[in-house]
Amino acid sequence: KAGVTQTPRYLIKTRGQQVTLSCSPISGHRSVSWYQQTPGQGLQFLFEYFSETQRNKGNFPGRFSGRQFSNSRSEMNVSTLELGDSALYLCASSQSAGPDTQYFGPGTRLTVL
Amino acid sequence: TQLLEQSPQFLSIQEGENLTVYCNSSSVFSSLQWYRQEPGEGPVLLVTVVTGGEVKKLKRLTFQFGDARKDSSLHITAAQPGDTGLYLCAGVSSARQLTFGSGTQLTVLP
């Protein structure tokens, strides 16, 4: 069974731009969660989608948004990029809603210049 | 906001030594997870502990959940270079969100 895939793996943007990251969960998994990992703040929960509905949301500004499609694939969007948005963005999938048994993808490394 | 403090932040030891990583919080968690992350990859779930006082063993790794479900420890016996990585604890809150600790970067030298 293929693991969680994230595209692109690396991305460079400039301040003020917007970016869309993609996550394909493990086949059969209906929940996708997104996390931001930085050296200073560590791993922080962004949001979780299950069956196309946002179930849970972390403490991030409205510039961070996401969605999930009927095939469970998910996208995350960050608008008006700031230097502090530079991070590794990880998505994780699980069969059921919630953080019980999640499988993480390799992440997308976003650099904002 | 529930916080998880991990210690030590960095640990460099020789192959064959034992080590313990600690994960502490002032908050109660419904369960606690331990992950290992290697460069260029996402975290991989090692274990989930659910019951206060629970002890789980995974080969040379022993995980313990505190009686009050506020803290946890990971003990590695006879560490090997393959154990090198970033170890992360993560608590599951009542709101079903994961709060991660800051991580322990372990380096095991041959």
Image (tube, coloured by chain):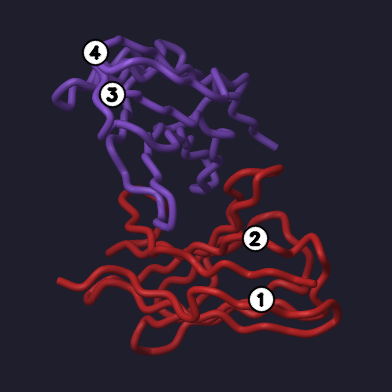
Q: Residue at x 40, y 33 (%)?
A: B31
Q: Residues within 10 Å of mark 2 (few under 14, many from 20)?
A: many
Q: Residues within 10 Å of mark 3 (few under 14, many from 20)?
A: few
Circles 4, 3 touching at the beta carbon (< 8 Å): no
Chain whose colour in the figure is red: A
Q: Sequence-wise, which precedes: disc 4 or disc 3?
A: 4
Q: Which residue is mark 2?
A: A87
Label annotation for residue A86: none
Q: Which residue is mark 3?
A: B110
Q: Which residue is mark 4?
A: B16
Question: What kind of residue is marked 1?
Answer: Ser
Toward which corner of the image does residue A97 lie, by quadrant?
bottom left
Q: Which residue is mark 1?
A: A65
Q: Is residue B104 above or below residue A68?
A: above
Numbered disc 1: secondary structure = strand
Percent x, y of residue A101: 31, 50
Q: A69 and A39: which one is in front?
A: A39
- Measured Cα–Cα span from mark 3 to mark 2: 31 Å
Q: Residues within 10 Å of mark 4 (few under 14, many from 20)?
A: some
Question: What kind of residue is marked 2?
Answer: Ala
- Measured Cα–Cα span from mark 2 to mark 1: 16 Å
Question: What kind of residue is marked 4?
Answer: Gly
Q: Which label lies toward us, 3 or 2?
A: 3
Q: B58 and A64: which one is in front?
A: B58
Question: What kind of residue is marked 3?
Answer: Pro
- Measured Cα–Cα span from mark 4 to mark 3: 9 Å
